[in-house]
Amino acid sequence: MLMVAWSVVRLIYWMLVVPYLIGQLFNFILPEGKKTIGITFILGFLIYIAIFEMVAIPCIINYVYESFTHCRQIYVVIVSLLAIGGSFRFSKSIFKRNIVCDLNTETKIYYGIFIALVLFQVVMNFIYAPFNGDDAEYVTNSLIAQQWGSMNRIDPNVGGPIDLKTRNVLAAVTMWIAFIAKSSSVHATIVSHVVMPLFVLPLVYYVYYQIGKSLFKEKKEIVPVFMILINMLFIFGNVSLSTPATFLLMRSWQGKALFSNLALPMIFWLFLLMFEDVSAVNEAAGTKEKLKITAPCWIMLALVNVLSCICNELGVALGCGLVAILTIVLLYASKRWTVLVGAFLAVIPNLAYVAFYLILGGGA
């Protein structure tokens, strides 16, 4: 029982505490009104994932049988140093924000329904831990890395050595899951089927909550109704061709589920924030003041694009396409050509991914 408790503590540390402390270290880039616990955590999580991608890819390419061991050692050192730095910048004032709004009883009831629906989904995922046929590759790759120390060099079906698959090298989310599993001494299958839903579902709904706050800024009482609608779409949406449910509920440990349910909404959310800032940017005096307003969203957008890359190879093109479409709309709304510069800088991770993909030979 003591070992289980220690594993839970380490899971909380590596999945919640370290990303938050990293976010605390870098949240100086955020506007004062956005330095909340949730947004600080999202910023830290995006940096946390981006660092893993940059460490994992060279290790996968340059090492054969000890690639995961080297990756984990380097990654632990980097993120630990950043987390320590974040602990020195820790500010208690972030917990003193007044989060209790002047809501009427009806709105509080709607929020209660929304929270109950989220808890229902989390509990059902925890109890049933839904199985999927893709586990034969995704979860097995994570398990091989955890137990044998090798990343994407062993066939998950027969256990023999194989050549690298380019898409597996670059979409390394399974290796991040292996890192969490190894660091907490929890089986990779348990991390995938039990821990990841507990982590991903609340995070996804928090992003949608931020979207709702931006969409209904003048009518806050509509936000919980919007969130209930989102819940209904996820529970009864049945949008997957191969699974009678949504990717979020049935495949939350897979990269394609993370991309479609987390990365894409984050892109929408960041552009909504930029639309809100259009008038403030136009009124700002000087380039420095304009950058102070616009830079945080573009930086976070670049980090979201890194998340798209680590999740799924299609996320590179789809995320980039969505950024392009929303940038055109933002260009029309703001009448500032500099948004094109910001968008280009934000999709550099996507372009680097494509270039690296071609250098490695492409293919499936």
Image (tube, rainbow, N blue to C red):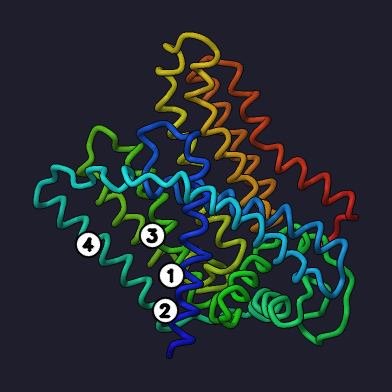
Residue at numbered disc 4: 113
Residue at numbered disc 2: 126
Q: Nearer the viewer, mark 3 or mark 4?
A: 4
Residue at numbered disc 1: 198
In the current view of this chain or complex, which residue is farthest to the bottom? 1
User: At label 4, which amino acid type do we have?
Assistant: Ile
Q: Nearer the viewer, mark 1 or mark 3?
A: 1
Quarter of the view holding residue 156:
bottom right
Q: Residue at x 70, y 42 (%)?
A: 349
Dot 4: element = helix
Disc with the residue nearer the chain's start (4 vs 1):
4
C-alpha separation, residue under disc 1 versus residue under disc 2:
7 Å
C-alpha separation, residue under disc 1 versus residue under disc 3:
19 Å
Q: Are marks 1 and 2 in contact (CB under 8 Å)?
A: yes
Q: Nearer the viewer, mark 2 or mark 3?
A: 2
Q: Is residue 173 above or below residue 153?
A: above
Dot 1: element = helix
Q: Residue at x 64, y 40 (%)?
A: 321
Quadrant in which the C terminus is drawn: bottom right
